[in-house]
Amino acid sequence: MFKRFLISFLLVSATLCHASQKEKRVISVLPTPVSIIEQPGDFTLKNGLTIGVSDASLLPAGTYLQSLIRQVVRSTVKVGKGDISLQLVGQENMPNGLSMKKEGAYQLNVDKKGITVNASSYAGIISAISTIRQLLPAEIEQAKAKSKGVVFSLPAVKIEDAPRLAWRGLMMDASRHFWSKEEVKHVLDMMTLYKLNKFHWHLTDDQGWRMEVKKYPLLTEKGAWRKLNAHDRECINRAAKEDNTDFLLPTEKLKIEKGDTLYGGYYTQQDIKEIVSYATQRGIEVIPEVDMPGHFLAAISQYPDVACTGLTGWGNTFSSPICPGKDAALNFCKDIYKEVFELFPSTFVHLGGDEVEKTNWKKCADCQKRMKDEKLHSEDELQAWFVRDMEKFFNENGKRLIGWDEVGEDGLSKDAVIMWWRSWNPTAVPHATKAGMQVIESPNKYCYFDYQQDKNTLKQILGYDPLSNDLSAEQQRLVMGVQANVWAEWIPSMKRWEYMVFPRIMALSEIAWAEPAAKLNETEFYRAIIPQLKRLDILGVNYRIPDLRGFHNVNAFVNEKILSIECPIPGTEIRYTTDGSIPTKKSLLYQGDLKVTESTTFRIRTFRPDGTPCDVVQTYFKKTPYAEADLQAKPTANGLQATWYDFRGNRCANITTAPINGTYKVDAVSIPEGVKGNIGLVLKGYLNIPADGVYTFALFSDDGSTLTLDGDLFLNNDGAHSPAEVIAQKALKKGLHPMEVRYFDHNGGMLEMYLLNERGEKQVLPKEWLLH
Ligand code: ACM
Ligand code: ZN
């Protein structure tokens, strides 16, 4: 039975079954199970409850379940049957054939007498425990005293469930900001709740080394600590500018040494063992990454001999790689990995391999000699040689190498796994799978959770199918799964981390777990997260309340306009100001439609039930007459005139100072074919408006873009940033309006302009509107 039927059935039956209870209960299990059949009755937790496991290997799972309900009942865990029985069964005894054989599949039966879980793997038992947790009232997450009057029962159900994809990952960047052991454990707890099973731990990078390596103690003694860098200072500035303490660097990660304030921390090998064990109990595999040969400055700063030029100087922002020309440098890398292999039981280990800056290799005699000896024709081939050498070492030690998609063409064996991150490199997955390699998909466009969120974010994740990409059935089998990556340059605290990750991680878990026919659409998803957010409230998770609707960045009107705000989460407290100040708990409460008759800037902020605020959003209501058309204009052709500048900066205004690479004609606001690398683009022409009216335009880009219309900077999406959309309205007279779009990017990029209709739906900008 698939979800569309299931949702309505559940909502109705939950209402009937629990009509006698004080509060009606709506069942929400995320990610969506394959099948769920509710039955009459429920099972109530009571003191003295027994958790029975069929096999001693499940005792950690039993103890984990016990810890989840400890707040409300006393229980014991034993081998044998119990009120709750967790049973490992042979795959042949799992129902429904194939899908139930997947690692993580389970069958859950709740009736008046108790709960039975059948699974053929430890992972399946853990999945079932997460479902049990979500079937219990959210108050299970809080201390007993506060949950008086709540009946801790689960509805009687039969659930059969299995994941679509085996790899459901989350990457935590511990280098840009350090996360304490407790914070990592919290993340693991939250991953399990949403059935994510691979914790990719980015332990090293230019900005800090986080793993104790016994052979090279300076890596953490010194390399784990830095003077505040530009990102840190920007975070501190944002804390003040946005009235948001979540941007402050946690004081427990600061220390004063010889008069300097240092920031950082690291994991001892004992800490790592503890975290791996904690994760294993929760069905999560920990995949370490020690990124090399690039992103290696934290190591090189302490051991300069492994670099080409003996680079020294902490705080140097230039990301220098190791020197693959020196045997000692190769041994250094392998020594580090020897310790990694001993600490992490996972077969998969991530080598990194991304964004290697190879300028030093060109100048280095050792690198050039290596290239000659090994008959390598370029620095790219030198990188491939290094990665292949490391893979051999990994394999000799029983490990399989994962690398970012830069290593996809490096001639690795079929045992290597490619992690796709560059959305602008769409052939990465087809190529790797054609070559017989497995892949994990984490395209930055959908899976980079450090990117800012907007009203399209959840829809875009839900709409992304990791098994599309024009893959054959055989290639699809090589897609292990998907992963969210949370780079931490601008995420200094766990509170900010939570804000960036929740609830979008639920959308990722949905696409990773649910089969397409069962997967929630956007509307269903918004409904399904309401009870989840209540659970997060009790857990104290600083989630982001999804976007308010009913306004754009700029809202034009000629006489008056109504500000009518919609919030997808009912009951959300919304406050606003009109004097430019940041809204606080004392600001005006939004209580319904507001009539606007003068140009007004609204700053709006939502508050979670515990009183903590989300980020400020700003919207400008602009009273304006219709802009006159240019009656002198005499365009001669369709489309826009495009000029490509060799631009390396990050402000649209400066693009035309760069040398010109070429000129083109485009029939849409887009990047012309063949324009790549350093892009500074200027598109010029006229917008041919068919009738007087207020029009809504959107400019979507990665990185920055601007639209000047009738000489006004009308859509401002400028600056270096991840994919982002700006929407504004303008009152326009029929006729020709001069327009200029500017855009820049240095690595692939995206540029799109479109119209929105009155319902806010995206419309293609008609080609015939563009002239030059
Ligand atoms: C990456 O984002 N450099 C993998
Ligand atoms: Zn070198």
Image (tube, rainbow, N blue to C red):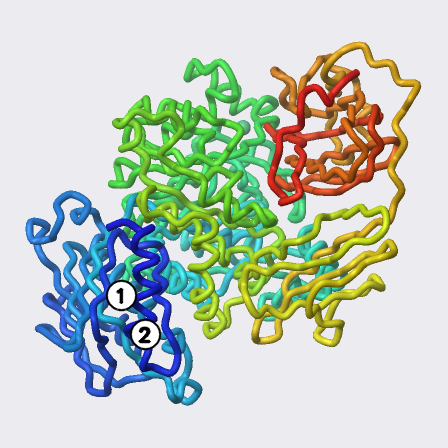
Horizontal side of residue 186 vs 744, given as left or right:
left
Horizontal side of residue 324 vs 597, given as left or right:
left
The amino acid beneath tag 1 is Ile
Report x, y in % for residue 348: 31, 43
Depth check: give the residue in front, 350 or 261: 350
* In this view, 372 is above or below 538: above
Q: Is residue 74 visible?
A: yes
Q: Earlier in the sequence, mark 1 or mark 2?
A: 2
Q: Which residue is mark 1?
A: 129
Report x, y in % for residue 210: 49, 55
Query: How busy is the neighbourhood of tag 1: few (under 14 within 10 Å), some, or many (20 plus)?
Result: many
* In this view, 14 is above or below 497: below
Give the residue displayed 44% in from the left and 24% down from the top. 427
Depth check: give the residue in front, 650 or 624: 624
Disc count in the image?
2
Q: Which residue is mark 2?
A: 68
Residue 106 sits in quarter: bottom left
